[in-house]
Image: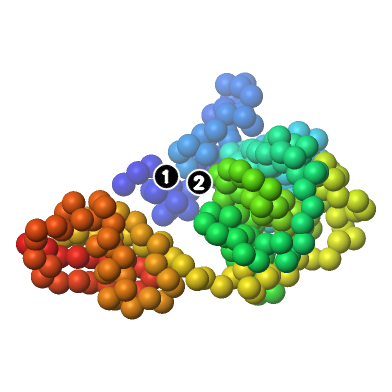
Amino acid sequence: MKIKDFLKENQISVGDNAYLLLEKIGTQYERVLRKIENEIGESAKMSKSKGNVVDPEEAVERYGADTVRLYILFAAPPDQDFEWTEEGIRGAYRFLTRLWNFVLDRADRLRDIDYRREDLKNLQGKARDIRRRVHETVKGFLEDMERNFQFNTAIAKIMKLFNDLANFDPKGDEDWKVLKEGVETLLLLLAPITPHICEELWQEIGKEGLISEENFPEPDLEALKVEEVEIPVQVNGKVRARVRVPFGADEETVKEVALRNERVRAYTEGKEIRKVVYVPNKLINIVVS
């Protein structure tokens, strides 16, 4: 059994004894204690006698109010306790720093982009996928917030959307319109949680007025429709290619698309197809001998 598992099972905090030792040898125990707790054991319950009380004003001064708000709301559901860790709040700070740098690096281009929803109706490929993820995030965020204010899962969806946007490399104007809608939507969703940074970035991308006065986003139901899906093609249980097929396509259609794929043909030509296993919209496995 690992030390941290033993401590947790027996409800022993490493801070209970480490604090006494560090205090006796006169070291800067607050910083050392937090490092020990993060790496070895379960964090000690906050207590003045243990010297591990977190001063909110100190945390705000060091990381900013938005970081503290984000960390507290993301750390656990509102009806549960959570242990304050230095690594946790640093993670929230890193996320906001990445968001800040991401938007500022693209702000000049985003300011020049205007769009209407009608402009985004006939997207293809990656741009269509990104826009669907944007509106899936809006839908999921609203569901989480309406179900007992589940801030932590709502924030997790925002972070996943940010990663999708950060990995999107826009080429032409159509792609940039998708990216601008995505950035605007992300900022609108995040604004109630981290209002200061969102207000600043809202201005940076050329928006007029306060973000706090904007309407909250609603999901575009048309964008949520899935017309195509990419699925893996296995030959004898090993993935050999990925193909795009119509959403809900039948087995015969998907098999034809898969067998036209050059990489799949290399493993199936001249061989007998003994069996086809198709999981709709998920995968197809072609068994040959």
Q: Which corner quadrant of the image does residue 95 belong to?
A: top right
Category of crowding for the residue at label 1, using alpha-carbon neighbours closer than 10 angstroms: few (below 14), some (14–19), many (at least 20): some
Residue appearing at x 69%, y 74% in the figure? 146
Q: Is residue 197 visible?
A: no
Looking at the image, residue 221 lies above or below residue 194? below
Q: Tell me the amino acid under the disc marked 1.
A: Lys
Residue appearing at x 27%, y 72% in the figure? 278
Looking at the image, residue 177 lies above or below residue 96? below
Looking at the image, residue 219 lies above or below residue 72? below
Q: Position of residue 18 (x, y in %)?
A: 53, 34
Mark closer to the chain start, 1 or 2? 1
Q: Residue furthest top?
A: 26
In this view of the protein, which residue sits in the foreground, 68 or 11?
68
Q: Is residue 191 left or right of residue 223?
A: right
The answer to the question of whether label 1 and label 2 lie on touching residues, with beta carbons closer than 8 A, is yes
Residue on which the image places disc 2: 42
Q: Secondary structure at mark 2?
A: loop
Q: Position of residue 187 (x, y in %)?
A: 75, 53
Residue appearing at x 64%, y 31% in the figure? 30
Q: Is residue 145 left or right of residue 132?
A: right
Q: Position of residue 203 (x, y in %)?
A: 86, 45
Residue appearing at x 87%, y 58% in the figure? 212
Residue on which the image places disc 1: 4
**Alpha carbon separation for disc pair 1 and 2:** 7 Å
Q: Secondary structure at mark 1?
A: helix
Q: Tell me the amino acid under the disc marked 2.
A: Glu
In this view of the protein, which residue sits in the foreground, 238 or 88?
238
Q: Position of residue 67 (x, y in %)?
A: 72, 44
